[in-house]
Image: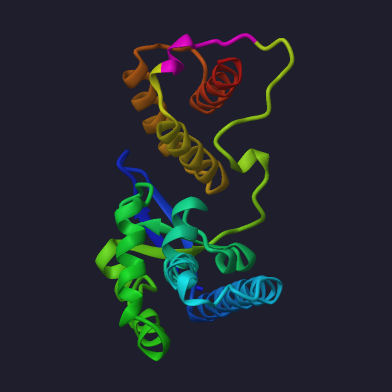
Amino acid sequence: MDSIKITTSQNVDLEYEAAGVGYRMLATLLDEVFKIVYIIIFFLIIGLTAKSNPHFYDGDNNYTLYTILILAALPYTLYYFLSETFMNGQSFGKKIVGTKVVKLDGAQPGVSSYMIRSLLRIIDSGLIALIVVAVTEKSQRLGDLAAGTTVIKLGSKVTLRDTILYKPVTNYKIVFDQVALLSDKDIAIVKEILDHSINKDKRDNLTLLAQKVKTKIGVSSTLDDESFLKTILLDYSHYQFER
């Protein structure tokens, strides 16, 4: 499987496994199943409602019926946009397969990125999408090319350690109060680069990241780079839990 190199705003190179045609096809098929199940459940509810209410389809209720149909169609039509936006780059199919949408510049995809990807599915689906994913260097379909995104294969199931916050330690005392100056986005980037650099044994990345964090929050430390960054993550976790 081809790898994708992403350079973050901290000038750190991260390598991910690209989600090829097979993974993307399987995720899409699963998503279509979820969409079909949603429609079936919706019409079952409508049918049961009509059965219990003989006047449900009367002329006076047409506007109500049309409104219900439009509201029901929105989640189906906006399925990919809504799921990827609220599930951090994953639809239900992607979550099962273990893939995720990421930005090629290392930033967190935003609403506009997910919207562009979703809108271009109108022309970017089926055989066209498969061909484009297969021939592009970073396994991108047209929506990805326009949004500056791609889809990667995640290594394993997500656990508490894979989230932004670490598990609290009893009687822990925050070392760097300045972590209050950091945002969730900052911490997410720190954790991702830290984990990736340790796994790939790229210590230079840790030195560069540690220096940027120290400069941002205005602290100095005698801790080695890895210990300093782990302390920052633990401090931030406790800062959030104590708020």
Image quadrant where residue 126 sits = bottom left
Q: Position of residue 86 (x, y in %)?
A: 49, 51
Rendered location of residue 151, percent (x, y) = 44, 65
Above or below residue 167? Residue 18 is below
**Render colour scheme:** rainbow
Where is residue 50 shown, x and y percent of the image?
64, 75
Residue nearer the viewer, 48 or 243:
48
Residue 72 relative to residue 145: left or right: right
Q: Which of 188 and 243 is in front in this view?
A: 243
Q: Is residue 18 visible?
A: no
Left of 169 or right of it: where is 239?
Answer: left
Could you tell me which residue is drawn at 38 percent across and 58 percent down?
5
Residue 144: image quadrant is bottom left
Q: Magenta stretch containing residue 176, yes or no?
A: yes
Report the residue that reaches farthest toward the left.
146
- Span shown in magenta: 173-180
The quarter in which the C terminus is drawn is: top right
Q: Look at the image and tell me whether residue 39 can be seen.
A: yes
